[in-house]
Structures are given as structure tokens and as C-alpha cells.
Image: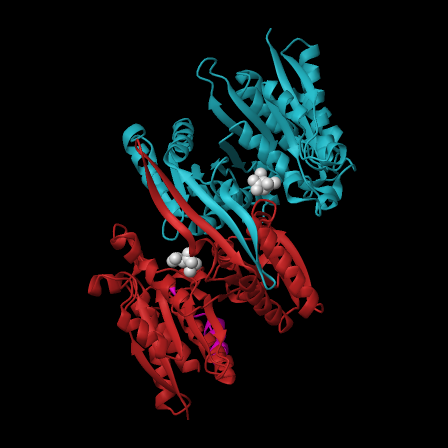
Chain colours: A red, B cyan
Amino acid sequence: MSVNKLFVLPGDGIGPEVTAEVEKIANFLTKEGIARFEIERGLVGGAAYDAHGVAISEDDMARAGAADAILLAAVGGPKWDKVPYDVRPEAGLLRLRKDFNLYANLRPAICYPALADASSLKRELVDGLDLLIVRELTGGVYFGEPKQIIDLGNGQKRAIDTQVYDTYEIERIGRIAFELARKRRNKVTSSEKHNVMKSGVLWREVIIDLHKREFPDVELEHQLADALGMQLVRRPKQFDVIVTDNLFGDMLSDVASMLTGSLGMLPSASLGAEDAKTGHRKALYEPVHGSAPDIAGKGLANPIAMIGSFGMALRYSFGLTELADKLEAAIAGVLDKGLRTADIKGNAPKAISTSEMGDAILAEL
Amino acid sequence: MSVNKLFVLPGDGIGPEVTAEVEKIANFLTKEGIARFEIERGLVGGAAYDAHGVAISEDDMARAGAADAILLAAVGGPKWDKVPYDVRPEAGLLRLRKDFNLYANLRPAICYPALADASSLKRELVDGLDLLIVRELTGGVYFGEPKQIIDLGNGQKRAIDTQVYDTYEIERIGRIAFELARKRRNKVTSSEKHNVMKSGVLWREVIIDLHKREFPDVELEHQLADALGMQLVRRPKQFDVIVTDNLFGDMLSDVASMLTGSLGMLPSASLGAEDAKTGHRKALYEPVHGSAPDIAGKGLANPIAMIGSFGMALRYSFGLTELADKLEAAIAGVLDKGLRTADIKGNAPKAISTSEMGDAILAEL
Ligand SMILES: CC(C)[C@H](C(=O)O)[C@@H](O)C(=O)O
Ligand SMILES: CC(C)[C@H](C(=O)O)[C@@H](O)C(=O)O
């Protein structure tokens, strides 16, 4: 049996609690001989800053590079609000994305029927919601240069960020979106602001072109990013796959995830290019939720998004599709039994802890 | 009685229908001697392109500049999807904003109790919602240079947009937000992405500084733009005044307006700097909704957002506060009577037309 190397970066806040539940499951699978995982652990974000004065160390970057998949929980917290810009917690995450060229961020927003009432939207609007945001993750205003603050004198400063997109960057993320749509409901909504931004003009042009050349069988529509934000709130079930740039994807995926009422439940995958020889993709898996410093260390966090992210790793990095299916079924099974952590408690009689939830999923598995 | 010069730009789609209702009301007020309005009319957007090949003519720019207030309905539609970038409908609107330095865009999101059920959010989350987004309107990625598409050869292009903010731009929009908060519930939420963007770093710094110096009595909090998008969906009533940049303001105000279930009801104002001598501000008033080409010319459009925008003009440009109050009361009165246009019909027995709604508000007045 081949060894699957997992590099776990718990990060900050509730990170260590939720990654512990994944390790529990991975170790069980190894022990039972169902699959073989080798786990290493590193530091990222505030945790790395406290230990090494950087947002991720060179050593951990190297170890991450040697792994088959990276599992990251979350970074940041008020404790590090004042650290220098270049070593702020987010810099660790952004470096992982950029250095490993993880350009394709897949963010499903799924509303579990058992949890539809936890949404702030009316039940009928979200029950059964299943959309996928495909966000470009290594370009745009996140990384474009110049990116600086200039002192103009007289108490005036000028801050500059640069949004840049090249044809090939738009094309490769578009391709991922169309390919995924084919395995789903065959519809892609592309979003930008071509009425205001040149990057939006190019984005639209490249997507239209790609569609015509390679994916004429997939339904394609365009929505301006502001209008799409509206439509997500108004009638989210109209969407299947949404493809958009780094910054719009950041905002829209947060709005989308909140619709589901299941923020603590949503996993994500960030995939790199396929290696021409091995066919292997670098990949990082992380929950959509943040580090939630306010509840850290209390056993209140919901580990399902993290466990679901591990499930995505099984599917996309390790080719363990059947096991991924089983893990997802185990999560659904536990929910069907009425087991709930605090964030999704609703009218349930009592909430269980982070590790109780991990145990329950493992038992179900 | 002083003459109030109104420059009306109906624009495209449902624009002519909804501005007609405002003119009806303004003409009535003039005839009755309650106030004096002088109305001129111009073209903007697709309508201007069809007539003059530009998004707004020099002549109309001059006439707009000579008016006390500009009333614009909406621009754009599929008919002009293929016109050159520089003369696309939106260019007319953007030129008005930029040339008249209308940097402060006020976008209230109010949920009328009578309409709370039309929201896609659960009633208790939005009933009584009353927040105000103060959006910076003449800076950021909308106008920053370079803004271009470069041909790199080999079928590759590079698109660039530039987000730029200077200290003074952030300070003046921050001041407007704090001043307005003092007349409301005294709370400002400032939003950016300082974890990723240098403009966010400067934005936060300038707002904190301004708050300390001039508005220590106002409550100030900060939320990242993605998190704010989430919170708008999750618990919108936590907000009073939100201050943010041009692009985030564009997206967040669309999400916020959709929460209310009253998109056809929401007015907005875009204000310039005060003239040092006269104290007068250049100003443009427009509905938050778009040109809705699909229902144009059918008498289905809701004129309330446009009439409400006229109400904001009475208040901010003409100093006719009492009349503005009366107009708003008339709108509320008509709604209380159960009169509804198609967009807000809900379970009402029947919908009335655009002009019937205008007539009803006039009668109520
Ligand atoms: C933590 C932050 C840098 C990050 C982003 O802006 O991409 C986060 O919001 C996300 O969506 O993954
Ligand atoms: C029409 C468009 C240029 C405009 C914008 O992006 O500002 C609109 O979306 C708005 O919010 O007023």
C-alpha cells in the first residue's frame, strides 16, 4: 500500500483542536490497514511568528513541498494585529498558495437539509443548495505589483495595489470550472466587473473564447460581481459552478458559505497545476471558516469542515474516492442522528464537543 | 421663492418611466407654489450613445454642472453590450461622478416593515433594518492608472487595474461617515482588506487616526470586507453606518440592498465637496436599482426609489427638509394602504402600475 504524506498545519485559534480530529481519523485508517498516512506537523501564521518570527519557516515550506497534501486549519487572531505586514499570519497562507502555485480554489457551498433552518435565509431558498465557487487564487490584486505605500510628505500617503491578470491565468482557472461543471449540473457562471475593470474585460473575453473552443456543451452565463452578490442572497439555487477572480472569489465565497447556515461545515481545496510527468498536483486543503480565537481551546469548535477538507484530500490528492465517499457518508450519518456541535445546535437538546464529534464520525465510519 | 434647478437624466431601460413620476411631483409642487423647480432633461448611457455616439455629451455635462442637483435613473442594457469600452453606458455615469468630484455615495438599506416578508432573509433578521453604506465613489480601482490591456504576443494579453488611495480621500469620506453616524445610532464600521491590500492598511490607519482626533465620541469598529459580506447576511441589524472603498462599497451595498426585499425602493445620493464660498455641494441622486431592460416600457417599474432619490435631493441639495419629510411620509402612507407595484406585490391582491404609484404618492402628499 502506498504511503500518503500529509503535512498538517494547525495554525492559530481553533486550528489545533480541529486538526487533532483529522489526525485521529487518519491514524485509525492507518492502524486498520485501510490506507496508509504519514503525518508531519508544522507551524503557520501567528504560531509560526511566535516560534520563529516569520509567518512560515523555510524548513516548513520545504516539508510542505515534500508532502502529498497540505492540511491547514486557519491563521490569524487579534494577538497578531500589530505585527509587521510582511510577517502577519496571513502572509504564511499567501506564501503557500503562491509558492506552490495553488491557483484553483474550490469552495463548495452546500446546505445540509438537516441544517437548513440554521440559515438566515428562508428554508425553501437554501434547502438542497449545492453550488461550487471556483476562485482564482494566485493572481489579481493579492499579488500584483506595485503594492506599496508611498509617503508624499505633508502628512499625505498614497497606497497602491495592482490587479493583474494574464490570459493563461484566466484560461486555466476557466478550464477547471468547465471541467467540474461537466461532472455536476453542467452550468458555469463567470463573474467580473467588465463595466469598470480592464481585468474584467479580459476575463470575460478569455472565458467566452475558451467556452467556444473547448466547452460548447456547457451552459455559460455572465454576471457582474455586484449583481452576483445580490443573486446569491436572492435566489442561490440558480447557480451550479461560479468562476471568478481572487478578490471577488474571496467575498462571494464568504457570502455563499454564510447562506448555508453551515459555515463550520464547509471544506475547501486549493489545487496546483498537474505535474507533466507524475500527473500529481500540489494541493492544500482548508476549512472555509476562520481561526475563531474567541472560542479557541474550549472544545466548542466544529471539526466537520476540517474533516471534510481531509475528505477532499482523499479524493483529489490520494485518489481514494471510495474512502472519501464513505467519510462524507459518515459525516451525513452523524448529522442525521442529530449530533450537533454548538455552532449548529439550533433546537437540538444538547451540543457535543469537538472531540466527541470527531469520535462520532470515526465510529460511524 | 428661490428656484431649484434640477437636471434629469432618465438614462436607459425603465429610466424614462420612473423619472416621469418625479417630474410629475416636482411640477405639482411648483404649480401649487410649495417650492419652485426648474427642470431640464439630458441623455446619458445607451440613450446618449444612440443619439451622439458618446456616453454623455459635453453639452449635457455643462448643463449638469449648472444645475443644483442631478437626478439620474439608470444606465445600460444588453443593447449596448458591444459598444467600445470608452463610450459604454457606464462611462457616462462614471464621468459624472469623477468630473463633479462626487466622492461620497450614501446608500441607505432600509427594510420597510410592510415589506419585510419580501426579503429572502427570515423576517426577524431584517424587520426594522436601517443601515447606511457610505461608499467612496471617485477613487480606488475605478479610476486608478494604469488601467489597460497589453498585448504580450503569442495570444497572451495582460490586463491591469490599479487601486489607489491617498490619505485625504480616505479622510474626507471617513468624516462624512462619522458625521452621519452622529445623527443616527452613533456607530461606524469601517471595512477593507488590510490583511491583503496596502490600500486597506492605509484605509484602516487613516480612519483610526481621524476617529481619535475628531470623533472619539462615535463608536468605531473594523471588519474585513469578506467578513462584512458574511455578517450582512448573518446579522444585518448589528450595523449603523458602514464606510468602505469604491469597489467593496459597490458589492456590499448590492448585498445590503437585496436583504431589505425592497430593491425597487432604495434611493442613493452622491455628494461632492462643499463649495468654500456658497456652502453648496454638487450632487447626483439615483436609485440603487438598475435599468431593468426586461421590464422597460411596460409600466411595471417601481418609481419609489427614484421618488425617494428626489426626496434626498430636497434634503441634501435644496434644504427643503420639511418637504422631504412629507414626501417620505407619503411613500410610507401609500405602502401602509397596501398599494404595491409588481416587484413588491407579495400576497397583495393586485399590483398597480408605475404611474398609478406616482399618482398615489402625489395624492397622499
Ligand atoms: C486569510 C485571508 C488572507 C484569506 C484571503 O483573503 O484569501 C481568507 O479570507 C480566505 O478567503 O482564504
Ligand atoms: C453601473 C456601474 C458602473 C456602477 C458601479 O459599479 O459603481 C453600479 O454598479 C453602481 O453601484 O452604481
- Residue A274: percent from left, percent from top: 50, 77
Overall secondary structure of the magenta section: helix
Compared with B287, A292 (above or below) is below
Q: Which residues are magenta?
A: A327-341
Is A362 left or right of A332, judged from the image as shown? left
Q: Is residue B330 visible?
A: no
Which residue appears farthest toward the top when viewing the image? B1
Is A333 left or right of B346, judged from the image as shown? left
- Residue A93: percent from left, percent from top: 36, 63
Is A335 left or right of A71, judged from the image as shown? right
- The quarter of the rendering in which ligand 1 is drawn is bottom left
The residue that appears at 50% across and 62% down in the rendered structure is A136
- Residue B353: percent from left, percent from top: 76, 33
Q: Is residue B195 visible?
A: yes
Where's the C terminus of chain A, which quadrant? bottom left
Is A42 left or right of B185, judged from the image as shown? left
Using the image as rendered, state which of residue A210 and residue A30 is in the foreground. Answer: A210
Quadrant in the picture for residue A302: bottom left
